[in-house]
């Protein structure tokens, strides 16, 4: 698998990360290095090995169906660049 | 029995078949959200039901709500579907203002519920089996309000993180009618088992509709997905419009572009969602914050034991054990509350009369469907608001079977019961509506009428049979409608 400049531009856009045009080539190189490195894992035969889902022997913790949180709109909105009438206010998103 | 009516779209090149599949999003009934302890209730102040997990603050971790898992399993069981004791949550990545995480926690590769099926009622005894492809659990997004400010969108995260079940059908439907009936049946089942309130107006149930067209026997055509349709009528309208649009494009030599569209209920048409033109690349991957979702057989057994009698089973019982018509049974089972009322009424009648269920079921069903539903519909009330209780209804019906009042008078009595909440017996007593079955009294009246109408009597005896009704009418008039019709008929025939 190999990443080119267009792919980097596209990934950056999907993640809404602004990347200057002149940095795209360098990033493509870095990403390819990472991919190559991970690619080495494919050399291992894992046919009979169950996928590992956690480093420790544990299972998913379940929560009871109780309301234990909420009613903190002020906290929730504290970091919002803009908020009005209890809502987050963002630049108009037109459907 | 399978459907024999074939729905087609007429084109200049012949008839086109339509192929429809639905993804229904059903909000799970639970107190708290899927991965946080904030309330899942509808209608709170903006951002009141939001925890820092729902707002995607850095460092917050999702913890699954067991009740949402149980509801998904119960729903899967009610759909006769495969339950997967091992499933997994994946991140579906996309960017939108009402999705603070930047991804939705969903189940992509390993859903909690696999294949099942739903038998859909198409009326006139026609049914169709629609396959279920899968059901998975996922988070709802927040709500964007675009119309409150000229150049801002307001975002309310109250819905963000509420548990949804996405129920995906196979592309088995071939007409708008079938799709509408499928949504209706799904809604009925969800409401029976109490895993979703099915309230389409509040958005707790909504459908994405996939439509394509083809010539009969051809491979599947390219489909378009109509997003977020929020009523059964709109589902049908959207399909009808979209199929026509696709046929027109193909017949004009065009190609269908696979895309996401919106249904505009005011114009009754679908249109392309311009903002989503860019092909989606969700970059699914297993959510590293969550271990696989696992449960044992005991959990499934408990979930199964918690299910009530389902609508299909109830309908069969109503027709086979109670002897109701298929139509009446369908009407009664369509809403669980209605079926519950009917069964409570039946129990009360059996208690009051000592008769068997089967003996009284037909009369009870007819009364519920024509009288009670008729009045409820007229006043726009739900059965839970009925001013006449099952016990009250049973008392009224017993007065008919006991011959105290006629069926005709019973309708008037019911009207008064409905308006005043008084008991049937009290109304009959108060207004002196008891049926006159006393043959002596009726006989005397008939004698008077015969004496008073010699012309009609002669004509009747001369062969004008229709005049019989005239005499019945006269007797009824004289008794204020209270004469027992059977007695009147019998005596009149004897005397004339």
Image (tube, coloured by chain):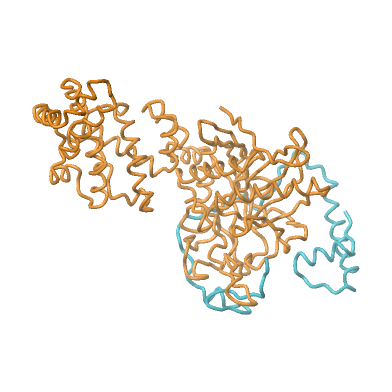
Q: Nearer the viewer, residue A32 or B148?
A: B148
| On-image quarter of the N terminus of chain B | top right
How many labels, in total? 0
> Chain A shown in which color?
cyan
Picture quarter containing residue B455?
top left
Horizontal arrangement in the rendering, residue B436 relative to residue B129 (left or right): left
x, y percent for residue A95: 67, 65
- Residue under the image location 13 percent in, 42 percent down: B432
x, y percent for residue A13: 79, 67
Position above or below: B192 against B454: below
Q: Nearer the viewer, residue B474 or B172?
A: B474
x, y percent for residue B287: 67, 55
Position above or below: B437 against B99: above
- Residue under the image location 73 percent in, 42 percent down: B213
Q: Nearer the viewer, residue B51 or B266?
A: B266
Which chain has been coloured orange in this picture?
A: B
x, y percent for residue B46: 51, 70
Position above or below: B254 against B12: below
- Residue under the image location 48 percent in, 43 percent down: B188
Horizontal arrangement in the rendering, residue B3 relative to residue A51 (left or right): left
| On-image quarter of the C terminus of chain B | top left
Q: Nearer the viewer, residue B207 or B387?
A: B387
Picture quarter containing residue A50?
top right
């Amino acid at each position: 698998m190999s990443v080119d400049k267009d792919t980097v531009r596209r990934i950056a856009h999907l993640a809404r990360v602004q990347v200057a045009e002149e940095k795209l080539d360098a990033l493509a190189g870095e990403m390819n290095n990472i991919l190559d490195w991970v690619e080495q894992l494919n050399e291992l035969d894992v046919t009979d090995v169950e996928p590992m889902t956690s480093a420790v022997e544990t299972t998913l913790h379940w929560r009871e169906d109780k309301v234990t949180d909420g009613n903190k709109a002020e906290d929730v909105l504290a970091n919002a660049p803009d908020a009005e009438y209890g809502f987050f206010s963002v630049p108009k998103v037109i459907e | 029995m399978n459907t024999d009516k074939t729905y087609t779209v007429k084109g200049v090149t012949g008839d086109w078949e339509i192929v429809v599949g639905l993804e229904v999003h059903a909000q799970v009934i639970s107190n708290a959200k899927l991965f946080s302890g904030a309330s899942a209730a509808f209608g709170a102040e903006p951002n009141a039901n939001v925890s820092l997990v729902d707002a995607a603050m850095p460092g917050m971790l999702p913890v699954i709500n067991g009740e949402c898992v149980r509801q998904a399993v119960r729903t899967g069981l009610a759909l006769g579907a495969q339950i997967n004791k091992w499933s997994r949550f994946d991140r579906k990545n996309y960017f939108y203002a009402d999705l603070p995480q930047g991804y939705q926690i969903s189940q992509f590769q390993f859903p909690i519920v696999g294949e099942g099926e739903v038998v859909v009622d198409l009326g006139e005894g026609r049914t169709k089996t629609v396959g279920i492809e899968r059901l998975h659990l996922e988070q709802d997004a927040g709500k964007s309000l675009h119309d409150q400010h000229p150049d801002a969108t307001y975002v309310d995260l109250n819905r963000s993180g509420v548990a949804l079940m996405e129920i995906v059908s196979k592309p088995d439907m071939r007409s708008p009618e079938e799709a509408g009936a499928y949504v209706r049946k799904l809604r009925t089942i969800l409401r029976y088992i109490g895993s979703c309130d099915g309230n389409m107006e509040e958005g707790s149930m909504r459908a994405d509709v996939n439509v394509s067209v083809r010539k009969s026997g051809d491979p599947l055509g390219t489909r378009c997905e109509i997003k977020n349709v929020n009523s059964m009528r709109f589902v049908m309208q959207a399909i009808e419009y979209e199929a026509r649009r696709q046929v027109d494009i193909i017949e004009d030599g065009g190609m269908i572009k696979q895309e996401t569209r919106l249904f505009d209920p005011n114009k009754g048409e679908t249109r392309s969602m311009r903002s989503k033109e860019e092909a989606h690349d969700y970059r699914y991957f297993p959510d590293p914050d969550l271990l696989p979702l696992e449960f044992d057989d005991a959990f499934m057994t408990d979930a199964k034991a918690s299910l009530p009698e389902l609508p299909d089973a109830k309908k069969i019982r109503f027709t086979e054990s109670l002897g109701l018509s298929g139509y009446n049974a369908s009407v009664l089972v369509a809403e669980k509350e209605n079926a519950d009322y009917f069964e409570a009424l039946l129990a009360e009648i059996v208690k009051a009369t000592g008769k068997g269920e089967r003996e009284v079921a037909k009369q009870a069903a007819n009364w519920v469907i024509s009288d009670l539903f008729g009045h409820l519909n007229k006043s726009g009330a739900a059965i839970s608001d009925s001013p006449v209780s099952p016990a009250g209804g049973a008392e009224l019906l017993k007065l008919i079977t006991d011959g105290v009042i006629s069926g005709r008078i019973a309708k008037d009595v019911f009207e008064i019961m409905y308006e005043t909440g008084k008991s049937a017996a009290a109304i009959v007593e108060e207004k002196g509506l008891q049926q006159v079955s006393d043959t002596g009294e009726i006989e005397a009246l008939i004698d008077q009428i015969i004496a008073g109408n010699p012309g009609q009597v002669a004509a009747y005896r001369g062969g004008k049979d229709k005049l019989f009704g005239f005499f019945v009418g006269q007797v009824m008039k004289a008794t204020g409608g209270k004469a027992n019709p059977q007695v009147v008929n019998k005596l009149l025939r004897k005397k004339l």
